[in-house]
């Protein structure tokens, strides 16, 4: 049995990277952004709406709003 490709992005750390307050702030900022339909990779440069594989709403938090958090994670 082969592991899914996304598992190559999973990183185990010895302690939490963000404190609970930082996580709550990310959730708050994400919920304040306009949601869009989640997509699946369709090959090449195209993302497809494929509701048999994925039906979800997502929000992208602009980098400028969480620059410090990105620095911590990096």
Image (spheres, rainbow, N blue to C red):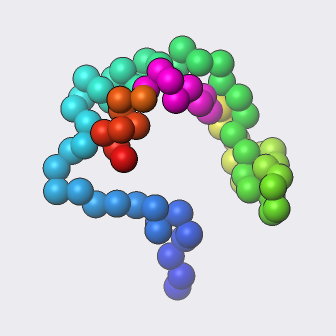
Q: Nearer the viewer, residue 50 or 23?
A: 23
Q: Is residue 23 above or below residue 48?
A: above
Residue located at (55% from left, 70% from top): 4
Q: Where is residue 33 in the image (x, y as percent from the top left)?
A: 59, 18
Q: Is residue 62 visible?
A: yes
- Would residue 38 be counted in the magenta stretch? no
The answer to which quarter of the image holds residue 10 is bottom left
Relative to 8, is 38 on the left or the right?
right
Q: In this view, does 53 lie above or below 4?
A: above
Q: Going by the picture, which residue comes out furthest to the top?
A: 32
Q: Which of 62 and 33 is in front in this view?
A: 62
Relative to 72, is 30 on the left or the right?
right
- Would residue 64 be counted in the magenta stretch? yes
Relative to 18, is 4 on the left or the right?
right
Magenta range is 58-66
Q: Can residue 52 be seen in this view?
A: no
Q: Where is residue 24 in the image (x, y as percent from the top left)?
A: 33, 23
Q: Where is residue 9 in the image (x, y as percent from the top left)?
A: 46, 61
Q: Going by the picture, which residue comes out furthest to the left?
A: 15
Residue located at (25% from left, 23% from top): 21
Relative to 17, is 3 on the left or the right?
right
Residue located at (56% from left, 26% from top): 62
Q: Is residue 47 above or below residue 66?
A: below
Q: In this view, does 42 lie above or below 73?
A: below
| Count of marks placed on residues | 0
Residue located at (30% from left, 39% from top): 72
């Amino acid at each position: 049995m082969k592991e899914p490709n996304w598992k190559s992005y999973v990183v185990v750390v010895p302690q939490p990277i963000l404190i609970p307050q930082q996580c709550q702030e990310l959730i708050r900022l994400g919920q304040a952004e306009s949601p869009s339909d989640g997509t699946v990779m369709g090959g090449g440069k195209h993302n497809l709406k494929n509701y048999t594989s994925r039906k979800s709403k997502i929000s992208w938090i602009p980098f400028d709003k969480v620059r410090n958090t990105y620095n911590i994670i990096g």
